[in-house]
């Protein structure tokens, strides 16, 4: 009883330790979010400190803005990189889970891009996809393609080139998580399936894939959220161009706020982006009980 009483009396020490973190969350997340929600109903601009309350005007403007719908389109194209990266990562993890020569080195090589600077990654791929003298287009010309794509410099191909970079960037992280999940699978189950005459494809599809479905679902949801929030990679490579063809929602918020200085309208877009992420999170919460198989 005395010990429990002492613990209760010293409970305030724990609050002291978490106080700096709580103050940081309050100052840099909660208060700015509340202020942004308030600005959503104003016409506040950096260049004009005299703002007025506009009610739902920003929301009406949002759903009548062609650039907003274009940014949704480009965001959806960008999100296509997530399932593709997961599929490739799963196949790579299957290979590396077996006895492969230099397995540790290969794991490190695949994971290296994920821990690299986004700006460094952008610079490397800008060189690779350089239209006139880049190595990728040089190879395409060598095999007979006279007019290869302009990649980042062409509005018709820029977003798909960004997808390639994102797939490569996320591949190592997804592969490592899949590899950890594969190593948790009981070898007895796999051996029993082999004894019953199941082939490698059947074992992978009927046994391995369902057993890693929790991992797949987690990677899918977190990948979608990270991709929706992605900013630095596209900003460093194209800045949203050419002709706005890579302006996803996060860049649309940035440009509206810091290029056009329309903070009220930018707040409206950012809250829409928050709603998208919230919906994805709810889908995760509901779907993990329905679509995950053990």
Image (cartoon, helix red, strand yellow):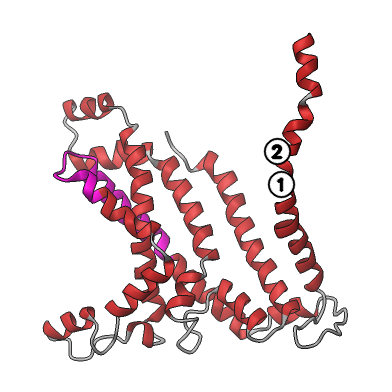
Q: Which residues are magenta?
A: 80-106
| Viewport quadrant of the N terminus | top right
How many numbered marks appear?
2
**Percent from the top left, x then y, of residue 224?**
50, 59
Residue 12 as seen in the image, left or right of residue 168 = right
- 249 vs 187, left or right, is right
Residue 275 image position (x, y, % from top left): 66, 62
Count neighbours of disc 1 (C-alpha within 10 A) and say few if under 14, some if 14 to 19, many if 20 or more.
few
Label 1 element class: helix
Judging depth in this view, the residue of 275 and 139 nearest the camera is 139
Q: Can residue 158 be seen by looking at this rendering?
A: yes
- Disc number for residue 193: none
Quarter occupied by the C terminus: top left
> Dot 2: within a 10 Å radius of its alpha carbon, few (fewer than 14), some, or many (20 or more) residues?
few
Q: Position of residue 169 (x, y in %)?
A: 37, 62
Can residue 91 be seen? no
Residue 92, magenta (yes or no): yes
| Residue in the picture at 38% in, 61% down | 116
Instruction: Establish if 134 lies above or below 202.
Output: below
**Toward the viewer: 239 or 115?**
115
Residue ID at (36%, 38%): 181
Instruction: Tell me whether circle 1 and circle 2 mark residues in contact (CB < 8 Å).
Output: yes
Give the residue at the far left of this rendering.
143
Q: Which residue is mark 2?
A: 17
Look at the image and say whether residue 188 sits in the magenta stretch: no
Tell me which secondary structure the magenta stretch mostly adopts: helix
Q: Is 127 or 221 nearer to us in this picture?
A: 127
Please give the residue where the numbered disc 1 appears in the rendered image: 20
Element at badge 2?
Answer: helix
Q: Locate residue 176, reporting x and y percent.
A: 35, 46
């Amino acid at each position: 009883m005395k010990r429990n009483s002492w613990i209760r009396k010293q409970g305030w020490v724990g609050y002291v330790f978490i106080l700096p973190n709580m103050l940081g969350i309050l100052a840099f997340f909660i208060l700015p979010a509340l202020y942004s929600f308030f600005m959503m109903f104003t016409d506040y601009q950096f260049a004009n400190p005299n703002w007025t309350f506009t009610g739902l005007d920003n929301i009406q403007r949002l759903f009548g803005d062609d650039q907003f719908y274009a940014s949704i389109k480009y965001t959806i194209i960008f999100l296509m990189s997530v399932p593709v990266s997961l599929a490739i990562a799963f196949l790579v993890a299957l290979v590396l889970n077996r006895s492969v020569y230099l397995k540790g080195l290969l794991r490190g090589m695949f994971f290296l891009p994920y821990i690299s600077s986004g700006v460094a990654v952008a610079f490397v791929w800008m060189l690779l996809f350089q239209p006139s003298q880049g190595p990728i287009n040089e190879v395409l010309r060598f095999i007979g393609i006279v007019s290869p794509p302009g990649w980042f410099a062409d509005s018709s191909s820029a977003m798909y080139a960004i997808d390639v970079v994102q797939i490569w960037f996320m591949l190592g992280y997804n592969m490592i998580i899949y590899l950890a999940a594969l190593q948790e699978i009981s070898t007895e189950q796999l051996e029993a399936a082999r004894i019953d005459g199941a082939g490698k494809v059947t074992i992978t599809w009927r046994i391995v894939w369902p057993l890693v479905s929790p991992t797949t679902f987690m990677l899918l949801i977190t990948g979608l959220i990270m991709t929706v929030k992605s900013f630095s990679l596209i900003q460093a490579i194209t800045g949203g161009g050419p002709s706005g063809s890579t302006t996803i929602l996060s860049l649309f918020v940035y440009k509206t706020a810091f290029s056009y200085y329309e903070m009220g309208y930018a707040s409206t877009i950012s809250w829409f982006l928050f709603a998208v992420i919230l919906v994805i999170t709810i889908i995760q919460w509901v779907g993990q009980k329905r679509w995950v198989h053990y």
